[in-house]
Image (spheres, rainbow, N blue to C red):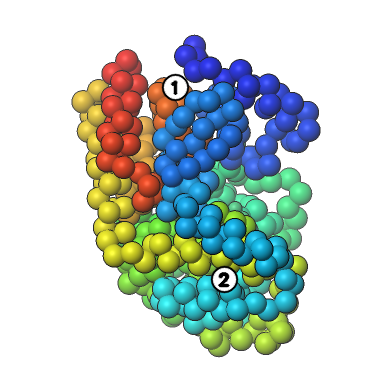
Amino acid sequence: MVSSTLKTTKSEEIFAAAQKLMPGGVSSPVRAFKSVGGQPIVFDKVKGAYIWDVDGNQYIDYVGTWGPAICGHAHPEVISALRDSLENGTSFGAPSALENVLAEMVIDAVPSIEMVRFVNSGTEACMAVSRLMRAFTGRDKIIKFEGCYHGHADMFLVKAGSGVATLGLPDSPGVPKSVTSNTLNAPYNDLEAVKALFAANPGEIAGVILEPVVGNAGFIAPDAGFLEGLREITKEHKALLVFDEVMTGFRIAYGGAQQKFGVIPDLTTLGKIIGGGLPVGAYGGRKDIMAMVAPSGPMYQAGTLSGNPLAMTAGIKTLELLQKPGTYEQLDKMTKKLSEGLLKIAKEAGVAACGGQISAMFGLFFTAGPVHNYEDAKKSDLGKFSRFHRGMLERGIYLAPSQFEAGFTSVAHSDEDIERTLAAAREVMASW
Ligand SMILES: *Cc1c(COP(=O)(O)O)cnc(C)c1O
């Protein structure tokens, strides 16, 4: 571990206290610095592209509260809309017109979504969608991909990505085998493996769920033809195709990865951005499938706080801001400069690295690559990643504390922020 030049006395005090109060001192394992060493910094304030810690250090942020902050943190228009909404109450537990507004925006934007149900997190959305896949097809088995993360529901905690990959806990105790025996895993970008699973389980597979661009095993793009291939295979077997766009929705493009790649799934899950920084998830898709959801149909799923007026308000304002012409062109151009810059710096420093970017999502692995799946991602030099993470943190750049997470930019990141980030990376790698 490099000796720290960063003053983090208050962060350390608060985190030490937190560790006595909450498991690992955090409310979500991905926030811990377990895989990179050192202790997490404790945030005090977020604004635009920046975060401040309790010791007064300022950082350029590439986590964006794990995705939602695509307009920048605490955007003045989102805050102002929330203030107005707050005056009308924090929860209705009854229909509100705000739900119609966000539902219409989501349906207009996302090609596969004809009807939508709001929930409170991406985990809930994926849990509900798996039930719906099974209810609609009358089949129990689901295919997912190694290193993809679909929240922490039992059936998805097999060879999962995100924090489970970071902490090396591919399977979790407490998950009944009877549940995960219906979860089939294939390597990402491997159509032959998917075909083999369908062949070995005839008439038993309800569908395939995936991150259309992986962000939870680090950043991994789909190979040409992969998404199209899955669409064909699922059609052929009368199984459903589900894109988990909790991360990629409104980030890869306004209409998500399905718009970007022109492959339309049957069902889609959303979260993160559509809540504008408040807790939201959603699932939606074809009308005939969504009609199965209670009270319209028999598949039960409910939520006390679902469609919460504050969350709807933040989501509506965030999507409105994203509709500004040129938003995604700007995000793509900026993120490309960052991603290509990092690769060039690594090359000049003689550091084996590969990575890429689509729109406002990027990643860097410390392996020559290429990375097509989770097995490839695991070849990244995690020691180098830890040193990179620490070096960047000490230079005021906040990256996700894990190799197995994508990076996120926002419309608030300026060209100067990108330049400063690249200068920091150059300094860090120059000393290797
Ligand atoms: C974040 C994420 C989830 C889980 O969402 P939560 O709101 O954290 O429960 C599910 N799927 C994907 C692809 C995600 O990135």
In the image, residue 215 above or below residue 427: below
Q: Residue at x 47, y 57 (%)?
A: 77
Drawn side of residue 77 relative to residue 294, left or right: left
Is residue 287 visible to the viewer in this orientation of the structure?
A: yes
Judged from the image, the quadrant occupied by ligand 1 is bottom right
- Mark 1: give few (<14), some (14-19) or many (20+) Cα within 10 Å: some
Q: Residue at x 72, y 76 (%)?
A: 94
Q: Residue at x 58, y 59 (%)?
A: 82
Quadrant of the snapshot with the C terminus: top left
Instruction: Residue 350: give x, y in percent of width and height.
Output: 24, 23
Q: What amino acid type should be assigned to the residue bearing mark 1?
A: Glu
Drawn side of residue 292 relative to residue 248, left or right: right
Q: Which quadrant would residue 311 be assigned to in this image?
A: bottom right
Asked whether 231 or 413 is in front, the reply is: 413
Instruction: Residue 412: give x, y in percent of width and height.
Output: 38, 47
The secondary structure type at the circle numbered 1 is: helix
Instruction: Residue 358: give x, y in percent of width and height.
Output: 32, 53
Asked whether 313 or 69 is in front, the reply is: 313
Q: What amino acid type should be assigned to the residue bearing mark 2?
A: Tyr
Name the N-terminal-most of marks 1 and 2.
Answer: 2
Asked whether 47 or 62 is in front, the reply is: 47
- Mark 2: give few (<14), some (14-19) or many (20+) Cα within 10 Å: many
Q: Residue at x 55, y 38 (%)?
A: 45
Marker disc for residue 77 = none
Q: Find the residue positioned furthest to the top.
A: 3
The secondary structure type at the circle numbered 2 is: strand
Residue position for label 2? 283
Residue position for label 1? 394
Is residue 244 visible to the viewer in this orientation of the structure?
A: no
Drawn side of residue 10 relative to residue 295, left or right: left
Instruction: Residue 296: give x, y in percent of width and height.
Output: 67, 87
